[in-house]
Amino acid sequence: MPELQPLRSDHAPALLAFELENRAYFAASIPDRGDDYFARFEERHRALLAEQQAGSCRFHVVVGASGELLGRINLVDLADGGADLGYRIAERAAGRGLATWAAREVCGLAADAYGLAFLRAAARLDNEASRTVLARAGFTVTGETRLSGHAALTFVRQLA
């Protein structure tokens, strides 16, 4: 059974390995993080932990039964009772319902532990898998937008 864990400093090596291993896979459907992200990973990881400590974001990793890092799911820009949802699941774990499980889990945390009333998300039109995850996790389409120059849909989920 997978586990959702709040991001910690000791996750850094596994998280870097996860991002490197899945870089090309992620870049097929979302913008690449760029070489600087990887070159300055330790610094960026510390900055994320500081943001989490300040309460403006909540970062999580998805850990498999054997302790392997299978994904990440984040709530960013917490303000006015809401936050933006983002997630990445390893290519080797894709297509098994893990992203939907993680999205549902983080929705529960958002309401119960973080006191949020709603979550927002967006997914490109050509990313059917992500749009399916959001629909299965209870998000509804609210409009259209562009993500890195690509047509996308916006979503919201009321938590209360």
Image (tube, rainbow, N blue to C red):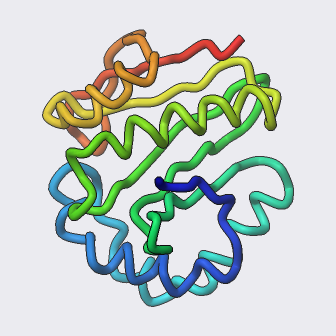
Residue at screen point 50% across, 58% down: 62
Examine the rendered structure and indicate whether residue 49 appears above or below residue 140.
below
Compared to residue 158, the image places residue 153 above or below, namely: below
Give the total of numbered labels. 0
Query: Where, quadrant-wise, is the C terminus in this rendering?
Result: top right
Residue shown at 72% from the left, 18% from the top: 117
Residue 82 position, x and y percent, is 69, 26
- Residue farthest to the right? 54
User: Which of the 4 image quadrants contains residue 34?
Assistant: bottom left
Left of 92 or right of it: where is 11?
right
Q: Position of residue 19 (x, y in %)?
A: 37, 73
Q: Residue 12 placed where, x, y %?
A: 57, 81
The foreground one among 117 and 97 is 97
Residue 55 vertical position relative to residue 16 in the rendered view, above or below: above
**7 vs 126: above or below:** below
Q: Residue at x 47, y 53 (%)?
A: 1
**In which image quadrant can residue 133 be found?**
top left
Q: Residue at x 32, y 80 (%)?
A: 20
**Relative image position of residue 138 (x, y in whole percent):** 45, 16
Is 4 left or right of 16, judged from the image as shown?
right
